[in-house]
Image: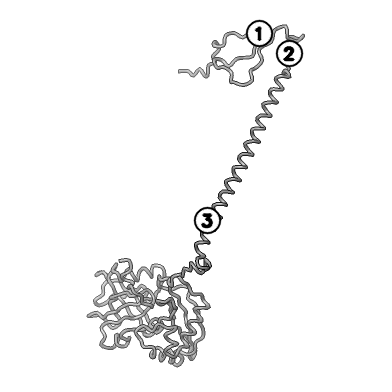
Amino acid sequence: MKDKGISRDVGAGGKRTRGEDPGLGGFHRAGGVPLPEPGDPAERSATGGRRRRRASSEDRYSHEKDHKRARSAMMIWTMLLGAGGIVVIAISVGIWLKSESDRRNDTTDTGRTTTEYIRIEEPAEKKKMGEAEAVALATKALAARAEEDILAVIDPGPVPASEVGGFLQGLQEREGTITGYDLMARLDSPREDLVGVVVSFEKDGEKGNRIALFAPDGSGQWKMDFPAFSRMATPSWDDLLTGPAESAVVRVYVERDQYFNGPFSESDGWVCYGVASPDVDRLLFGYCKKDSPQDLAIRSLLDIRKMARVTVALEKAEGADSRQFVIKRVLAHDWLVGDEPADEAGR
């Protein structure tokens, strides 16, 4: 079907008289000031054209009057809105001042100031220790010899304070002179209430270090953990490696490894970790079943770093060589043992 386009309504308006404006077809004109009617033919100019009708003075007066009314209305609404805004602000300020006054009256009972009356102590586990404070505390802890001084800045764990003093006294002879204290930027423990300081030593040109880990005790007093600083092994490394001990709790470094031998086969579901300690002159190997709680606890650390510090329970295995051990427990990420073992976290 051929498109005829848009057709015009040419019949609804009837015929136009001579000189009449074209209409809008079947639609009435929009409302507003009406257009002037076509003039009488007698009002035509001498040349035959239509004369332009001049608006009357009454029309001009009506238009000016409407314009003044609109302008006055806008001014009135502007003034009303401004006054309303001022009233709302004044009421809000008044309510706030009254509530503030009531609060101050309530908190100044018996003449005490607000600060004295509402004193909220930050929990010890949320407090942080800065570098200067940590270094000063480490210096003080390593200088302690008397039992009273030791207990003030050191948590001895299961060791008598007198033995702690003896250990600290012999540090210089065993490991040399202290050459520096450095705050640790990263620890291997997820605990937020833990601060570490690396204590560096040097003896006969050989350098070494120990890690001083600090945590707040029950009263919020920061203390150095002696088992972590001394890298305590229970029983001793000698008893585990060459003596009768079948197992021991040790503080070591671990990393992923691939040494499978004897009773430990990858096909049987074992995973291997290299185990190292500054107090042992050879690399050891620890094994646990893949996806076991012990494997997951260690893997969570090694997913974001190559090597990590852990406290583990190692156990000898039948048929294994002297460097191979089963990782029976993962007691802590890092060397400070808390209340919850790392391989039970989240279970």
Of tags 2 and 3, the one toward the viewer is: 3
Q: Earlier in the sequence, mark 1 or mark 3?
A: 1
The residue closer to the viewer here, 315 or 53, is 53
The residue closer to the viewer here, 143 or 333, is 143
Residue 228 horizontal/vertical position (percent): 39, 81
**CA separation in Å, label 1 and label 2:** 14 Å
* Residue named by callout 3: 99
* Residue named by callout 1: 18
Which colour scheme appears in the figure?
A: one colour
- Which part of the image, by quadrant, shows the N terminus? top left
Q: Earlier in the sequence, mark 2 or mark 3?
A: 2
On screen, residue 29 above or below 315: above
Q: Earlier in the sequence, mark 1 or mark 2?
A: 1
* Residue named by callout 2: 51
Residue located at (69% from left, 8% from top): 40
On screen, residue 87 above or below 305: above
Q: Would you call the spot at circle 3 few (<14 residues within 10 Å), some (14-19), or many (20 or more)?
A: few
Q: Residue furthest left?
A: 318
Label 3: which secondary element: helix
